[in-house]
Amino acid sequence: MTTVTRSPRRGTAPAEATARAAARRGAGADPRRRAGRRRRIIAVAFVLPALLLLGALVVYPVLFSVGRSLFDASGTRFVGGGNYVEMFRDPATLRAVRNSTVWVVVAPTLLTGLGLVLAVLVEKIRWAAAFKVLLFLPMAVSFLAAGIIFSLAYEEDPDKGVLNAAVVGVHDLVADGSSYPGARAREGETARKARGGAYETAASLSPGAAPVALPLVGVKPQDAAAARPAAQAASAPAAAGELRGVVYLDFTPGGGGRPGEVDAEEPGLPGVTVEAVRDGGAVASATTAADGSFAFTDLDASGSYVLRLPGANFAAPYTGVSWLGPALVTPAIIGAYLWIWTGFAMVLIGAGLSALPRDALEAARMDGANEWQIFRRITVPLLAPVLTVVFVTLVINVMKVFDLIYIIAPGPVQQDATVLATQMWLVSFGGGNDQGLGSALGVLLLLLVIPAMVFSVRRFRRSQS
């Protein structure tokens, strides 16, 4: 009997081998897939709190503000782009845009330039670390505290404001103040008020006439404390061709005096300028002595003259500069901002400066370049990336400035110093109660900040690649 053996079908063994390999790969892939899924779950678990916080503090407020800007002040009536149209019709908003432009152009430019100069100079001094700490200290002060400090420094009263105290001190060194600030002549038969705060005799006088008495009131006691009695000067007769008189304080201590007449206890006022006026112009000038007396000896005997006390005798004392007035309030607040952020710019630029290749600087010196040429042609170009980062960072920060303006600017000039951030608050919560228009201002501020942020992020990515 013959046994017939069938050969296996072609392709059976390779198919089985393939199936077994696939099974082994599947068995090995499952643990890897599970491990990858586990890593993704862990990553999401770690990122989720940050995403929730970002959404709650950034994304939701932005979306809500965009939506709220499309409704009226009550939030019930849809107005579309009406708030955005109204925003650019409002003179206060246009003023805020103008002031914000001044801030963006001036403050970052000054800070970057000042930080660059200080960073270069600090390298030349011995106590560089202490100097950097000193300049960086204002960064530790809050904007609230800095605003209070500078609002006191900018006080117009020189007895309170340190800046005006310095200005007044310098002014008084080079210019004389008035003799009796706030004083005035007693108007009546003897004297009358003239233009420019001056006083003059009511009648014309001729040389040789009896001495004329010019009474003043409103003189501070300390200004007349060392004066001599005026009675003797008032009774001294005038010589031929002379025109004499006395300027005195028409007030008797304890009462009992006679207004308009020189009493025995009434003091003369020294240092008062008296002018002899003829045909509308001053022809001679004299200054009163310690007893208040004055005399004109070189006048034309045939003429008649009016005696005048110029207004400069009674002008208010110089009190300095109105730092927080409408004209200077924005530059004054920018000055406070520079005080705070100069250390920040200097430290960042100093870090970039320390990373510069010293061989390039030494090679330039060996080639005969002076320090100015090295600074302009080597240091600044090599520091350009750092300077750009500092400038863009400050632009973003300046666009959001609020605290300093709100604290330093007094109420009457708040509108003259307002920027977009303060205007947004004033419109929404500071009396305007129009949160639709305020939200539109917030969206405008966001749109203005975004380009600087995008530029900064792109530059950072290029530097990392």
Image (cartoon, rainbow, N blue to C red):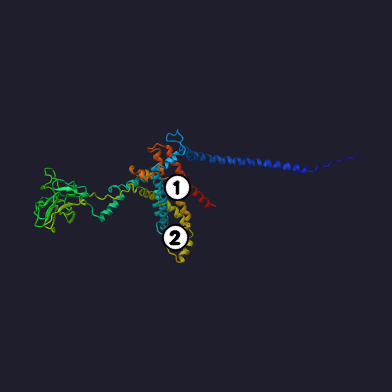
Q: Nearer the viewer, residue 205 or 320?
A: 205
Residue beneath the point at 42% across and 55% down: 113
Q: Residue at x 47, y 63 (%)?
A: 362
**Residue type indicated by callout 1:** Ile
Image height check: is 429 above or below 214? above
Closest to the observer: 183 or 202? 202
Report the disc number at residue 312: none
| Residue 142 seen in the current view | no
Q: Position of residue 452 (x, y in %)?
A: 47, 48
Q: To which residue does mark 2 refer?
A: 376
Is 33 on the left-hand or right-hand side of 266?
right
Q: Is residue 159 left or right of residue 298?
A: right
| 1 and 2 marks in contact (CB < 8 Å) | no
Residue 380 sits in quarter: bottom left
Identify residue for label 1. 396
Q: Quadrant of the N terminus?
A: top right
Q: Residue type at mark 2?
A: Arg
The residues tagged by marks 1 and 2 sit, at their Cα atoms, a distance apart of 27 Å
Of residues 368 and 100, the one nearer the viewer is: 100
Within 10 Å of disc 2 (Cα), the crowding (few <14, some 14-19, many 20+) is few
Location of residue 393 in the rendering, given as x and y in whole percent from the top left corner: 45, 49
Residue projecting furthest to the top: 76
Tell me residue 429's x, y (percent).
39, 38
